Image (cartoon, rainbow, N blue to C red):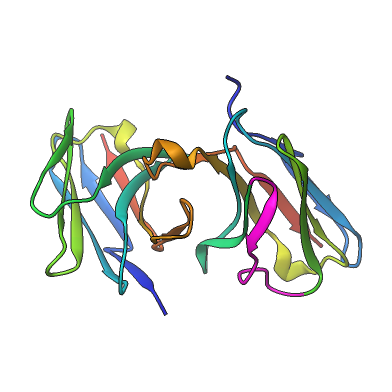
Amino acid sequence: DAGVIQSPRHEVTEMGQEVTLRCKPISGHDYLFWYRQTMMRGLELLIYFNNNVPIDDSGMPEDRFSAKMPNASFSTLKIQPSEPRDSAVYFCASSYRTKNTGELFFGEGSRLTVL
Amino acid sequence: EDKVVQSPLSLVVHEGDTVTLNCSYEVTNFRSLLWYKQEKKAPTFLFMLTSSGIEKKSGRLSSILDKKELFSILNITATQTGDSAIYLCAVELPNAGNMLTFGGGTRLMVKP
């Protein structure tokens, strides 16, 4: 399996622009997570899905952030409008709950810089 | 609020040294504790601990959990430059899928 695939790997944009980050989880995994990592705050959970349904979005910082999972093989995280404080590495991760290992498989991240 | 705290924040050692990384948690109820290693990119899984007092070992790395005192340690013996990374501790909450709450990490640098 190719693992969790994220795109773009790097994104530089200007304040006020819309940003869309994409994620393809590992085939067969039933949980998908979006995390954000910064030096100041470490890895923070933004939202997670189970079988394409959002379960907990309490970590989404503001209404400017939204996430969707239209099918089992694709998810997006959108920021509109973007602000400089959104600059971070955004990780998508997936897992297979039934295996009961607790292990998350992370993508390589999307590094976002908002100028 | 559930919290995971790691110490030290950063550590610089020389090759061959042994290091101990700490993770304490304030979680009312948890399912498991996991350790990840993050080099330049994505965190990669090291260990999952569910029971107190049982050591998990993989090569030069080992880890143990103390549920009574609410902490875990990760030991690395005979460190190598390739061990340089951020080590992340995370707690898995019950009834929340595999949702993990991460600590801030310990940045380890191993000098030749």
Q: Is residue A112 above or below residue B79?
A: below
Query: Percent from the top left, x then y, of residue A18?
Result: 90, 58
Left/right of residue B25 with respect to residue A40 in the rendered view: left
Q: Is residue A47 left or right of residue A115?
A: left
Quadrant assignment for the N terminus of chain A: top right
Residue B103 magenta: no
At x 32%, y 49%, the residue is B34
Q: Is residue B92 above or below residue A109?
A: below
* Residue farthest left in this picture: B53
* Residue A57 is a magenta residue: yes
Specify the farthest residue to the top. A1
* Closer to the camera in the image, A66 or A55: A55
Q: Is residue A12 left or right of residue B69?
A: right
Q: Residue furthest bottom?
A: B1
Residue A75: which quarter of the image?
A: top right
The stretch in magenta equals A51-62
Q: Look at 12% across and 68% down and name the residue there.
A: B68
Q: Is residue B64 visible?
A: yes
What secondary structure is the stretch in magenta mostly built from? loop
- Whether residue B41 is visible here, answered yes or no, is no
x and y, in percent, of residue B108 in the image = 31, 49
Which residue appears at 87% of the width and 65% of the height? Answer: A80
For the point 32% across and 47% down, the residue is B35
Quarter of the view holding residue B52: bottom left
**In the current view of this chain or complex, which residue is farthest to the right?**
A17
> Can you say which quadrant of the picture contains the C terminus of chain A?
bottom right
Q: Is residue A106 above or below residue A17?
A: above
Residue closest to the eye, B7 or B47 = B47
x, y percentage for residue A98?
Answer: 45, 39
Nearer to us in this view, A17 or B12? A17
